[in-house]
Image (cartoon, rainbow, N blue to C red):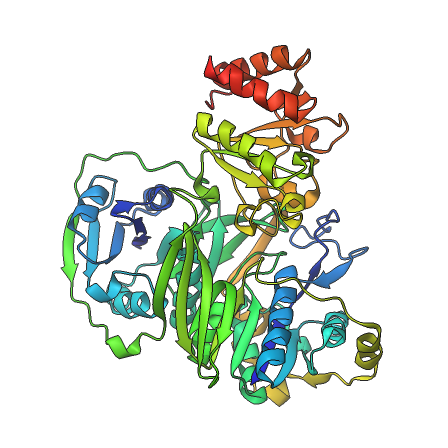
């Protein structure tokens, strides 16, 4: 009954999403009494193994190969499939990121086993594990069970679980042989362009978003200044993206990014259902809007009815104090 | 170029939804059904490729009778053929079985490129595209924002969204691509397009035509079971901060620091 984590790492660091998936894994292991293992795929993994060692994991399997230095689903599946067949975990967890949402469904299809994406809560009743995930743009929550052949493969929604706490026990680390034929890799990576520094919207602690009320692209610089002071990132509503003020990658909503930060500040956003679907699970929501009847105020913890071009600069001043 | 665009019909994202009496599904009365927005980008991209490289665009959708509406609206946009994958025994299929059914349809229709949305906005599962590629044993690229086909029509260069930016990849065709918002702006159907689409026959493929055995699909074969739908917990009532901008923002900073403790 072992639970496995497929660890994600970026620039030599285990991602927060992975540490959150480990939390989910520890929860299930505690309920089922099974072992918790992690697999790290990549090249030169010793430092990463050290980072994972004190996080409550029993065994770490390292799949170390130059062919795994960049993610491709072909290389990852070729690397991990034999290991899964050997150890037969009953559940595999990974973060619900671009990588996880590409790898997990392909791996589940290869193994012909159950796949659930974007799970944000896990409970056990009797011997059954109930997985919950948002549906219909977070307007409803569905609770599901899995059956059939194992391992079931589940991606964990960013920020749904706290990052795992340090554990006393160190993990046992094993290097695994990797047999990947270079000719089996059908995707060739030609380049990468970084469009945002550090964590993206989905992993950000603090998001400052602007909507139609921002009036033009230039005004988003003001939100950038507020974001800088708070250590956050700037997002946008669908209306602001459609107007061409912000790129699609910044869109928060049902189509766009679904986010759940500690603090979400909505500036000049009325709160269309499409937008609320993308941010209503944020821990604390602040709304700044001149229309007192804007639906965004219905879900805001704190609201300021006023002109954002007066309120936001004043807020920046207050925060500098 | 034989291009398949896979589309799904979903409830309109702007209307409210109710849970039905059974508690494990939504109330289907009064729902406005639309094409999944991500799939609409896939149809547009398919038409775009055809315009540059020639070939034909076939839209394929699996679902009940009402699904014909989105097939017809895609035909009105300019797709050449519409295929409706439909059979009562398909009901309750999980995403893998859906991909399996669609793989039989794709094999029957033939393809160089398969396009579909990166996920559907109803269940947000995001499995059918990648699983279909796996079943067909073709490469797939997820969440693409740009697609270019080589002159000899053998290689596709795609730009895909990854967590911190964009990744440029190349694959040999045939291949499957899931499409992210921002790749294009779907065209409106023209009036002649709508008239033409009305007269077009939609080809129906059922389990018999696809050679699917009932034990691989449907509710019985499903690896996941939806046990319950619920409403998310309601947020507690918030505070509107009074006074001029200076007073209100001062109070906001105080509350964020000392009450919510988020900064």
The total number of labels drawn is 0
Q: Who's the residue at 79% across and 79% down the image?
A: B197
Q: From the viewer's perspective, is residue A303 above or below residue B115? A: above
Q: From the viewer's perspective, is residue B45 above or below residue A251? A: below
Q: Nearer the viewer, residue A273 or B162?
A: B162
Q: Is residue A149 visible?
A: no
Q: Nearer the viewer, residue A307 or A120?
A: A307
Question: Viewed as shown, does residue A80 lie left or right of B136?
Answer: left
Q: Who's the residue at 17% across and 55% down the image?
A: A44
Instruction: Give the x, y percent position of residue B89.
Output: 64, 77
| Residue extending furthest toward the front | A218
Residue A214 lies in quadrant: top right
Q: Is residue B1 visible?
A: yes
Question: Viewed as shown, does residue A210 lie left or right of A231?
Answer: right
For the N terminus of chain A, the quadrant is: bottom left
Q: Nearer the viewer, residue B110 or B51?
A: B51
Q: Nearer the viewer, residue B17 or A180?
A: A180
Q: Who's the residue at 68% across and 13% down the image?
A: B242
Q: Who's the residue at 48% across and 49% down the image?
A: A119
Q: From the viewer's perspective, is residue A112 above or below residue A243? A: below
Instruction: Give the x, y percent position of residue B169.
Output: 40, 68
Instruction: Give the x, y percent position of residue B125.
Output: 54, 59
Question: Viewed as shown, does residue A288 lie left or right of A105?
Answer: right
Instruction: Give the x, y percent position of residue A45.
Output: 19, 53
Residue A2 lies in quadrant: bottom left
Residue B28 lies in quadrant: bottom right
Question: Viewed as shown, does residue A148 lie left or right of A42?
Answer: right
């Amino acid at each position: 009954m072992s639970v496995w984590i497929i660890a994600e790492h970026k620039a030599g660091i285990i991602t927060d999403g992975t540490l959150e998936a480990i939390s989910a894994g520890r929860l299930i292991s505690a309920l089922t009494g099974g072992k918790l293992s992690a697999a790290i795929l990549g090249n030169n993994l010793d430092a990463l193994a050290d980072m994972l060692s004190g996080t409550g994991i029993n065994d770490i399997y390292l799949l170390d190969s130059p062919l795994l230095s960049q993610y491709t689903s072909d290389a990852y599946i070729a690397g991990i499939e034999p290991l899964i067949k050997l150890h037969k975990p009953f559940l595999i967890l990974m973060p619900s990121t671009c990588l996880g949402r590409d790898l997990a469904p392909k791996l589940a299809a290869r193994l012909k086993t159950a796949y659930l994406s974007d799970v944000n809560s896990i409970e056990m009743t009797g011997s059954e594990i109930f997985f919950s995930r948002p549906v219909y743009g977070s307007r409803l929550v569905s609770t599901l069970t899995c059956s059939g052949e194992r391992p079931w493969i589940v991606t964990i929604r960013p920020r749904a679980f706290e990052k795992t706490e340090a554990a006393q026990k160190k993990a046992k680390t094993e290097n695994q042989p990797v047999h990947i034929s270079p000719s089996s890799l059908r995707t060739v990576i030609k380049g990468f362009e970084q469009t945002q520094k550090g964590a993206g919207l989905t992993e950000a602690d603090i998001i400052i978003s602007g909507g139609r009320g921002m009036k033009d692209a230039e005004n988003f610089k003001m939100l950038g200044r507020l974001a800088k002071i708070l250590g956050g990132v700037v997002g946008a509503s669908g209306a602001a993206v459609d107007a061409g003020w912000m790129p699609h990658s910044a869109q928060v909503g049902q189509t766009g990014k679904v986010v759940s930060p500690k603090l979400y500040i909505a500036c000049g956003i009325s709160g269309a259902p499409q937008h609320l679907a993308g941010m209503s699970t944020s821990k604390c929501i602040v709304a700044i809007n001149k229309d007192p009847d804007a639906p965004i105020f219905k879900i805001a913890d704190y609201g300021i009815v006023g002109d954002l071009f007066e309120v936001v600069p004043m807020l920046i001043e207050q925060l500098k104090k | 170029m034989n291009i398949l665009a896979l589309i799904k019909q979903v409830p309109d994202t702007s209307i409210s939804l109710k849970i039905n009496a059974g508690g494990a599904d939504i109330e289907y009365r009064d729902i406005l059904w639309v094409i999944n927005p991500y799939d609409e980008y896939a149809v547009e991209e398919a038409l775009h490729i055809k315009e540059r490289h020639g070939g034909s665009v076939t839209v394929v959708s699996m679902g009940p009778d009402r699904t014909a509406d989105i097939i017809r609206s895609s035909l009105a946009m300019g797709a050449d053929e519409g295929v409706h994958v439909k059979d009562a025994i398909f009901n309750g299929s999980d995403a893998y079985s859906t991909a399996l059914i669609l793989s039989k349809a794709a094999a029957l229709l033939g393809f160089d490129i398969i396009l579909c949305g990166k996920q559907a906005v109803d269940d947000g599962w995001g499995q059918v595209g990648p699983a279909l590629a796996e079943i067909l044993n073709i490469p797939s690229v997820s969440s693409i924002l740009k697609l270019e086909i080589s002159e000899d029509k053998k290689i596709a260069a795609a730009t895909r969204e990854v967590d911190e930016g964009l990744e440029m990849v190349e694959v040999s065709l045939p291949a499957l691509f899931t499409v992210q918002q921002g790749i294009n702006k779907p065209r409106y159907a023209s009036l002649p397009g709508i008239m033409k689409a009305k007269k077009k026959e939609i080809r129906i493929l059922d389990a018999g035509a696809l050679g699917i055995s009932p034990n691989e699909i449907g509710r019985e074969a499903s690896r996941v079971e939806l046990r319950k739908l619920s409403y998310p917990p309601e947020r507690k009532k918030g505070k509107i901060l009074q006074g001029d901008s200076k007073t209100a923002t001062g109070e906001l900073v105080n509350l964020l620091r000392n009450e919510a403790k988020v900064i």
